[in-house]
Image (tube, grey):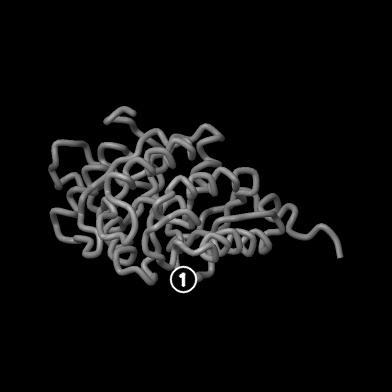
């Protein structure tokens, strides 16, 4: 993994495992299609009830490999009290300028976890500031074409859907790589909301529900302040209605 590797897509999560849950299928799909994909974790996940930062780092590396990411960068902005001050903004600006993504995925700013809410604003602001030539950091200015958002705990009406049917098992494998966090009948650690079997069932149920909207097996939904421009509106709806 090259420390200077540039990518087309950078997926950002507040904690290790956020991007796997929110957009892991899309990352796997894009990677399989030859797109250059990277991941950035804003914290080490040190405030989690289960596991340790060291355990989660190893799990995160395994999950990134499964998804086909070229790298997984990590910052230490404070799990449970995610920093959003100027130094935090500049840390994210540095990653964006170094990795030069065209598209950034970030948590939706409407969620149960305050860190996800803070991460959404932090990434949005940093993506803008990264394009300011007057902001001198020792690297050339670079602004992604767009930041789009993936929902986490709460439901949200998507701006667009990505069909991840063909890679859905890869997404689940990447999620299951975080063995310390999710359901493990042999674990002796305290039970949490996300360690229940129902939580993982919910991950699949959401993908199936999004998929049903587009008449496909599984999909991930994204929210964008600017809707994507369709080159071919007819092709965009192929397969939505196949009979009565």
**In this orientation, does residue 233 appear?**
yes
Q: In this orientation, which residue lies closer to the viewer: 187 or 171? A: 187
Residue highlighted by disc 1? 154
Residue 28 position (above or below residue 190): above
Residue 5 position (above or below residue 234): above
Residue 16, percent across and down? 35, 50
Label 1: element kind: loop
**Image position of 63 (left or right of 34):** left
Q: Which residue is drawn at 33% across and 53% down?
A: 51
Q: Which residue is drawn at 52% across and 47% down?
A: 26
Residue 85, percent across and down? 15, 60
Q: Which residue is drawn at 31% across and 27% down?
A: 2
Q: In this orientation, which residue lies closer to the viewer: 191 or 97? A: 191
Residue 188, percent across and down? 39, 57
**Image position of 164 (left or right of 91):** right
Residue 61, percent across and down? 37, 39
**In this orientation, does residue 105 appear?**
no
Q: Which residue is drawn at 55% across and 35% down?
A: 32
Q: In this orientation, which residue lies closer to the viewer: 19 or 221? A: 19
Q: In which quarter of the image is the C terminus?
A: bottom right
């Amino acid at each position: 993994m090259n420390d200077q590797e540039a990518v087309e897509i950078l997926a950002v999560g507040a904690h290790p495992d956020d991007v796997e849950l929110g957009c892991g299928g899309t990352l796997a799909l894009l990677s399989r299609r030859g797109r250059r994909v990277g991941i950035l974790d804003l914290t080490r996940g040190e405030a989690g009830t289960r596991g340790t930062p060291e355990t989660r780092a190893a799990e995160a590396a395994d999950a990134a490999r499964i998804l086909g990411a070229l790298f997984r960068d990590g910052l230490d902005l404070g799990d449970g009290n995610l920093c959003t001050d100027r130094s935090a903004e500049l840390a994210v600006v540095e990653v964006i300028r170094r990795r030069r993504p065209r598209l950034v995925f970030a948590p939706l700013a409407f969620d149960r976890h305050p860190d996800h809410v803070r991460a959404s604003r932090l990434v949005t602001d940093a993506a803008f500031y990264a394009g300011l030539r007057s902001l001198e950091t020792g690297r050339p200015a670079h602004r992604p074409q767009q930041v789009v958002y993936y929902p986490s705990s709460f439901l949200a009406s998507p701006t667009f859907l990505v069909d991840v049917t063909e890679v859905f098992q890869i997404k689940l494998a990447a999620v299951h790589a975080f063995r310390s966090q999710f359901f493990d009948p042999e674990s002796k650690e305290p039970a949490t909301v996300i360690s229940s079997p129902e939580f993982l069932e919910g991950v699949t149920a959401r993908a199936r529900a999004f998929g049903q909207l587009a008449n496909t097996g599984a999909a991930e939904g994204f929210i964008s302040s600017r809707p994507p421009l369709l080159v071919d509106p007819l092709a965009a709806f192929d397969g939505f209605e196949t009979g009565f």
